[in-house]
Image (cartoon, rainbow, N blue to C red):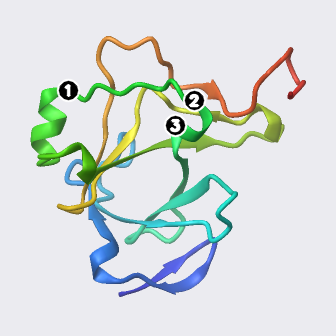
C-alpha cells in the first residue's frame, strides 16, 4: 500500500505492517489505521507512528524501557481483551513523545503507553490504572531546569 506522509513523502507500507486501532487514539478517534516507521539508525530510539489516512498525522514514539529501565506496565483486563493478547511475547509497548522548542525538555507519556499486539496487528493507547506515572516524563535527565546530564 502506498501512503503519502508529511515527513517522508510517498512510501510503501506492506499490508502486514498495518496496525488497526479500533478506537483510534485519544483525541484522534477517527484515525484507525497506522504503521510504525522504524528509524534506520539503531542507536536512535525514536520512531514514527504514522496515520495511513491522514498524511500530516504522525506521532514520535519511543521504547520507554530504553529510557526508564524500571518502567512497569500492568495492562487493564479490558485492554488485554480488546487487543486479543494471549502472550506477553506478542506485545510491543511504545510511548508518545512531545518535542518542544527546547529539545532537552522533551517528554514522553508513561501514563498512556501505545500497546501493540504484533500477532493480531491491533493497537491501543492504554491509560494505566493505579499508576504513579504521568503524561510528561523527561526523556533526558534534568539536573535543574534547562540542564541536561
The image quadrant that residue 39 belongs to is: bottom right
Q: Residue 3 appears in which quarter of the rendering?
A: bottom left
Q: Within 10 angstroms of label 2, few (less than 14), some, or many (20 or more) residues?
A: few
Position of residue 46 measured from the top left corner of the image (x, y, whole percent): 62, 54
Q: Which residue is mark 3?
A: 65
Above or below, 127 against 23 in this view is above
Helix, strand, or loop for circle 1? loop
> Do labels 2 and 3 touch, CB within 8 Å?
yes
Q: Is residue 4 left or right of residue 13?
A: right
**Secondary structure category for the residue under label 2:** loop
Q: CA distance from mark 1 to mark 2?
A: 21 Å
Q: Residue 136, position in %: x, y?
A: 58, 25
112 displayed left or right of 118: right
Distance between the alpha carbons at the discs numbered 3 and 1:
19 Å
Tell which tag, 3 or 1, sits nearer the viewer: 3
Task: Using the image as rendered, state which of residue 122 and residue 69 is in the foreground.
Answer: 69
Question: Distance of mark 2 from mark 3, alpha carbons?
Answer: 5 Å
Q: Residue at x 35, y 83 (%)?
A: 14
| x and y percentages locating residue 106 in the rendered image | 71, 36
Q: Residue at x 35, y 27 (%)?
A: 73
Q: Residue at x 54, y 60 (%)?
A: 48
Q: Do tag 3 and tag 1 residues touch (Cβ < 8 Å)?
A: no
Where's residue 104, x and y in %? 81, 35
Within 10 angstroms of label 1, few (less than 14), some, or many (20 or more) residues? few
Judging by the rendered image, the residue that carries numbered circle 1 is 76
Q: Nearer the viewer, residue 123 or 57?
A: 123
Provide the secondary structure element on which disc 3 rests. helix
Pointer 2 residue: 68
Residue count near mark 3 (Cα–Cα under 10 Å), binned few <14, some 14–19, many ≥20: few
Quarter occupied by residue 38: bottom right
Image quarter (top left, top right, bottom left or bottom right) of the C terminus: top right
Amino acid at each position: 500500500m502506498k501512503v503519502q506522509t508529511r515527513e517522508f513523502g510517498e512510501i510503501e507500507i506492506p499490508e502486514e505492517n498495518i496496525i488497526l486501532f479500533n478506537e483510534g487514539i485519544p483525541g484522534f478517534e477517527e484515525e484507525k489505521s497506522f504503521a510504525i516507521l522504524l528509524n534506520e539508525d539503531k542507536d536512535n530510539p525514536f520512531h514514527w507512528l504514522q496515520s495511513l489516512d491522514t498524511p500530516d498525522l504522525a506521532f514520535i514514539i519511543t521504547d520507554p524501557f530504553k529510557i526508564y529501565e524500571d518502567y512497569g506496565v500492568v495492562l487493564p483486563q479490558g485492554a488485554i481483551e480488546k487487543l486479543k493478547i494471549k502472550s506477553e511475547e506478542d506485545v510491543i509497548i511504545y510511548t508518545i513523545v512531545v518535542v518542544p522548542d527546547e529539545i532537552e525538555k522533551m517528554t514522553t507519556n508513561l501514563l498512556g503507553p501505545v500497546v501493540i499486539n504484533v500477532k493480531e496487528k491491533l493497537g491501543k493507547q492504554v491509560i494505566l490504572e493505579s499508576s504513579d506515572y504521568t503524561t510528561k516524563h523527561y526523556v533526558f535527565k534534568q539536573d535543574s531546569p534547562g540542564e541536561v546530564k
